[in-house]
Image (cartoon, rainbow, N blue to C red):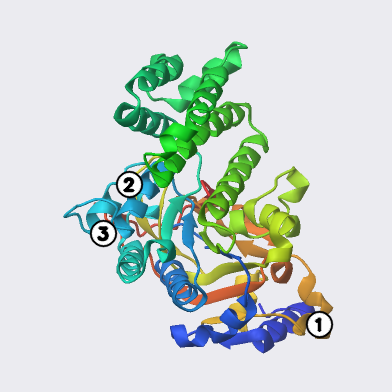
Amino acid sequence: MHPDGQGLALTATIRDAAKPLRSPADLDPLLERIGESRFVLLGEASHGTSEFYRWRTAITRRLVEERGFSFVAVEGDWPDCYRVNRFVKQLHESTESAEQVLHAFARWPTWMWANREVIELVEFLREHNSRHSWDRQVGFYGLDVYSLWESMAAVIDYLDRIDPAAAQQARRAYGCFDRFHGDAEEYARSTALTPTSCEPDVVKMLTALRANAPAYLEDGRDAYFAAEQNALVAIDAERYYRAMIRGGPSSWNVRDHHMVDTLNRLMAHHGPTAKAIVWEHNTHVGDARFTDMARDGMVNVGQLVRDEHGEEGVVIVGFATHRGSVIAAREWGAQMERMSVPPAREGSFEDLAHRSDAGDAFMLFGDELEKNPQAIEPLGHRAIGVVYRAKTEQWGNYVPTIVPYRYDVTMYIDETSAVDPLHMPVAVTGDEPETYPSGM
């Protein structure tokens, strides 16, 4: 079926706004758009698509080398990502390779960061840092909130090294969680049945850590910062899991507020001239106000960063694809699979971009919106999470989106391929893809 009159107009607008995307040199107009902005948020339409990772790496390289960006902050857990940070800054003697460091990402879905595409980014950061003084080295950090047990263990490990008495205090405080044996959902369910929780214990531990900050800082500013961040993760993770069990938008909002709070802490830690690159799913970085998320009471990172830092310069880059393959799973916690991504739903942004014959391109809509106001109408925009279900592909994977407002720049790759995970095996399915935008 051919697109209707509105679809034809939107297709023409996409074609007119598109700039070719073939090599990193083609990114010049994007860097001009970024200018002196201090925040660049790079999305992805799925967590398992190779081209999204590779183009984000290409953009990151240019921002680091040409614009002096300070760090990369990703949709990953703080403890695992801080280990990568230590590797890229060569903070400890180690014979590990980038692959070995990334292979240590053990929390499902491992393929998000334990893949060969991320090795390229990590090796670039390490090589870049080897040529620069400490104050110009680029960090790698995790913004997410899932690592309740890992972050508590990291706080104890830190205190064991510098203040054994305080470490015992931490063990007693965090001992509130012991009976749940590392099962966050079991803990959350228990709080739904009784009015008690471990919240006072994790808050008490952060207070104690901060009370000793002057002494701990003498051991190293970065080490203390990481320990304090783990204590904050423990607080927000406890809140997140309690909210998750109750349902509704509150757990999503706890998570995205935590990610923005962490981003703000990192900016302060890196100083007044710091610049941040964020890697997260479109659903987090694309401004929620221009989707149906706002109707459901959800906020996200893109919206919050625009609100808080708009005057400092915020550029949001969304990603999209028409068809290809992806790494995902059929159920939460299931084995990863390499699945086919079918051609996009008719009338969706991806479908119109494909019909425009622009090929791989990025769109800076700019003046094109004035020529065609129809381009600011909502379109279906595909989102694939870590769980992908075939039966709901045409209904459950498309977020109504005003694309030119949700993002400042939209990167479109016509045909994409799955990432190359480090943790094998990967099941390859010839079935219809299972799709649903869950587990962003």
Q: Which residue is rendered at x = 55% and y = 69% of the image?
A: 320
Nearest the viewer among 230 and 421 is: 230
Q: CA distance from mark 1 to mark 3?
A: 47 Å
Lateral position of residue 193 relative to residue 373, left or right? left
Badge 3 amino acid: Ala
Q: Nearer the viewer, mark 3 or mark 2?
A: 3
Among the 4 quarters of the image, the one containing residue 374: bottom right
Among the 4 quarters of the image, the one containing residue 1: bottom right
Q: CA distance from mark 1 to mark 2?
A: 46 Å
Lateral position of residue 364 relative to residue 157, left or right? right
Nearest the viewer among 301 and 38 is: 38
- Tell me the tag on residue 372: 1
Q: Is residue 30 visible?
A: yes
Q: Nearer the viewer, mark 1 or mark 2?
A: 2
How crowded is the residue under tag 3: few (<14 C-alpha within 10 Å), some, or many (20+)?
many
Badge 1 marks a residue whose secondary structure is loop
Nearest the viewer among 230 and 225 is: 225
Identify the mark nearer the N-term, 3 or 2.
Answer: 3
Q: Which residue is mark 2?
A: 105
> Total label count?
3
Badge 2 amino acid: Phe
Q: Which residue is rendered at x = 75% and y = 49% of the image?
A: 294
- Tell me the tag on residue 110: none
- Residue 265 locus on image (x, y percent): 56, 47
- Tell me the tag on residue 98: 3
